[in-house]
Amino acid sequence: MALRLYNTLTGEKEPFIPRVPGKVGMYVCGVTVYDFCHIGHARAGIVFDMIYRYLQFAGYDVTYVRNYTDIDDKIINRANQEGTDYRTIADRYSAAFDEDMDRLGMLRPTIEPKATDHISDIIAIIEQLIAKGHAYETDGDVYFAVESFPGYLKLSGRNLEDMLAGARVDVDERKRNPMDFALWKASKPGEPWWQSPWGTGRPGWHIECSAMSMRFLGPSFDIHGGGKDLVFPHHENEIAQSEGANGCQFVKYWMHNGFVNINSEKMSKSLGNFFTIREVLELFDAETLRFFILQAHYRSPLDYSDQSLREAQAGLARIYEALALLDDALAGAATATEKVSSAAELTEKVAGLLPRFREAMDDDFNTAQALGILFDTIRTLNRFLAEGGGKSAESRMDLQHLRAAVGEIGSVLGLFQAGPADWLAAREAVKTQQLKISPAEVEELLAERVSARQNKDYRRSDEIRDYLLARDIQLVDTPQGTSWKVK
RNA sequence: GGCGACGUAGCCAAGUGGUAAGGCAGAGGUCUGCAAAACCUUUAUUCAGCGGUUCAAAUCCGCUCGUCGCCUCCA
């Protein structure tokens, strides 16, 4: 079963055939560093991190480039607001971005270039575009002439006439066509600038991605990704610039992740309905957020709410609880000789787990289905362990294989890497901090309850249990004694 | 106005022609002094609605309704 992926350019799922067998060049649009990232950025990061990991898992040698756009109007505006320079802003939010991505457990891309380190590359491309008649200079600005590029709008599937008809495009007498976009902007007083053949100025938005992708991946490469909102104009313009300059196909497969919504509406800065990654991580752990995002297919819209995050956490806990039981079983001796009734089913599920996982992932990175398959396997495991199969000598290999397979799947999804006991303990610790009762008091009452139960004073025993439950303490009675956890 | 996507159980969510994964929540059971936890079982004759194509459709086509997105910076 070969990998197939949805290509925005063709609107279809296609077999993935890299340009050079065994190697993949992938460029993903990073962020413009002028503010903290919200969970929409988290989704994009996590989705392409998962894709990067899976491509490597599938045996490809992947060169993954993700840029920082560190010069842009927004950065300059922010700097002006704060009375500082653009570099301070860019550096501050680049560092914040790195910190957020690290906390979310993302692998670092192979290369993370900055736009301002590639000004000369940018200028070289613009010169080439002017030479080929795709761009023109006016008053120190340089524009791309969209009408000179026949393939314009092929990615977003529109046409120029329709777009102009009802469009809100700023009228600029100096542009040949209202849709022409800036490659280079002359600097205004007080703005950062670089020397160019057209005077002092700075790059327009879009051209930096053409320059950096070409520098590190060549004029033509395999995968280009980003959020759905970048299809137009950003990626459309990148195609025009790169193909206009190089005369060859820019990107073979275009991939776009869906939005994170709030109440079915897109989370965005302009609507003000966004949560930063930092805010969310104060309420939920990073793995829960990652699990939540991967429970949906990457192209689907995803509605964010406290409720859905809590549900994701419950689901993730279910997996860690099963893994904790599995680890316990593996740590114990396998001495039992009789077979439990679900042993055969376990064998079958374990054998099928990785192939089914691959099949789901090969189908356009269907992580939602992949996780469903894992849950299906976990259910069989739970039953097997509940039947006492953990001590079975015969099934020991199955359990070992299962543990290894879950570890492997987890490493591709960036999940389940914590020790299950540790993860559960950490979750417990966070909850304990929020309690309105001290652990010492709990222990005291617990001791009282034990003696009450020994004296068959169930009225007192239940009273204590209810009292603790009202304070979110859940008692767990087992034949070995009573322990407690935070509800 | 142009272009596009989506509409699957109480909620979330897979499923692109062969008869509805999974999670959360709920119900019943096992266990228990009774509970809880855990485990087991169970919850859509049906996939927004109406037509059509087909031996066969949630899946393809048309129309209607609803939601959302892009067209302006945006992951």
Image: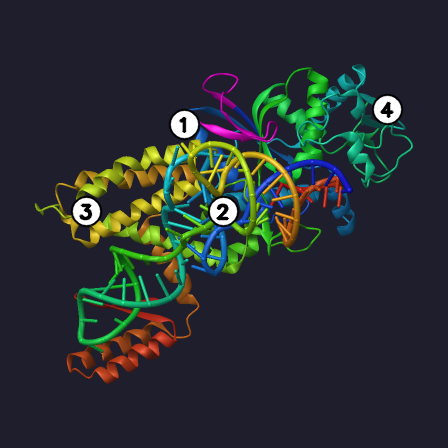
Please say whether residue A201 is visible from this viewpoint. yes
According to the picture, the residue beneath numbered tag 2 turns out to be A293
Considering the numbered disc 2 on the image, is that residue within a helix, a strand or a loop?
helix
Q: Is residue A299 magenta?
A: no
Circles 1 and 4 on the same chain: yes
User: As drawn, is A285 to the left or to the right of A353?
Assistant: right
Amino acid type, label 1: Ala
| A296 up-or-down from A156: above or below | below
Chain part drawn in magenta: A1-24
Crowd class of label 1 (few under 14; some 14 to 19; many from 20; radius 10 Å): some
Query: Where in the figure is residue B41, as x and y percent of width and height?
Result: 27, 56
Q: Nearer the viewer, mark 3 or mark 4?
A: 3
The answer to which of A109 and A263 lies nearer the viewer is A263
Q: Nearer the viewer, mark 1 or mark 3?
A: 3
Q: Kindly indicate whether the residue at mark 2 contacts the one at mark 4 (C-beta within 8 angstroms).
A: no
Task: Name which residue lies at 69% across and 20% down.
Answer: A243
| A376 up-or-down from A202: above or below | below
Q: Nearer the viewer, mark 2 or mark 3?
A: 3
Amino acid type, label 4: Glu
Query: Disc 1 versus disc 3: distance between alpha carbons?
Result: 32 Å
Query: Where in the figure is residue A266, as x and y percent of width and height?
Result: 63, 50
Amino acid type, label 3: Ser
| A160 up-or-down from A481: above or below | above
Chain of the residue under the numbered disc 2 shown in the image: A
Circles 1 and 3 on the same chain: yes
Query: Disc 2 versus disc 3: distance between alpha carbons?
Result: 32 Å
Q: Nearer the viewer, mark 1 or mark 4?
A: 1
Q: Kindly indicate whether the residue at mark 4 contacts the one at mark 3 (C-beta within 8 angstroms).
A: no
